[in-house]
Image (cartoon, rainbow, N blue to C red):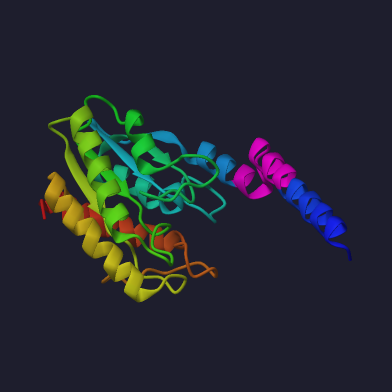
Amino acid sequence: MSRKWYVAAVLCLGLALVIGLVATRSQPSAVCSQLIRNAAASAHRADDGSIPAAVLGDSWASGWGEPDSRVSFASELARLEHWDAIIDAFPGRGYVVEVCGDHRLLRAVPSVPAQARVVVLEGGLNDVVSPLDLESLRAAAVATIRAVLSRVPSARVVVVGIPSVPARSDRLVAEGNQNLQAAATAAGAQFLGLSGLRIPLQADGLHPTAAGQLMVANFLAGAIGSGN
């Protein structure tokens, strides 16, 4: 192949890639459509009491994989704690990672009711992939906590730790938890780790079963209710 034809081929390939990227960004993929549907189905107000609260989270808070998307630790926790809670969950969400647009936890803070007394932040599982930028994770968690406290200064902010699951490296989960705990301490929030729980998981090794969701809810309710 002559140099002239080689250059033309490379330019055509480059143009095709650009067109493909533009098409992908302008129209949500099938995966994004599924995530958006799940988030829309799981977003609700759990009116199980008189204590205003909010739970901001990822697929664990959305009840991913269950026939009823409201079967989640977030809904069960609200029931156990007698919260009137807003649940804002988006699968794939993290403190740093962006999926199908910017759905980071920080972007969900405006959904927190102005009178909320408790705000639960659950995330990080989608952030602990290789390579892991620990400094960015810690900084993003601090920014998210401070944004919540700026909105509701008197609220109790609870940061839920990253669970240990087969689909994630134990080392990355441990490092992620260390940085989330450091962020919580620095920003004035409470950290509740899940790494000691043996949570029943779905076949994907990533999401909890209904029993796993209930286990997480009971653990958090016990810790939050006791003030630990």
**What residue appears at the point 37 percent right and 36 percent down from the top-left corner?**
108
Residue 157 place in picture, x, y as percent? 19, 43
36 above or below 210?
above
Q: Residue 203: which quarter of the image?
A: bottom right
Residue 197 place in picture, x, y as percent? 29, 70
Q: Is residue 44 left or right of residue 194?
A: right
Q: Magenta stretch: residue 19 in it?
A: yes
Q: Is residue 136 visible?
A: yes
Q: Nearer the viewer, residue 62 or 209?
A: 62
Q: Magenta stretch: residue 152 in it?
A: no
Q: Is residue 227 left or right of residue 204?
A: left
State the residue lying farthest toward the front: 3
Name the chief secondary structure element in magenta. Answer: helix
Residue 121 place in picture, x, y as percent? 29, 46
Residue 77 place in picture, x, y as percent? 30, 48
Q: Is residue 194 visible?
A: no
198 above or below 18?
below
| Span highlighted in magenta in the image | 18-34
**What residue appears at the point 54 percent right and 56 percent down from the top-left corner?**
65
**What residue appears at the point 18 percent right and 51 percent down from the top-left corner?**
184
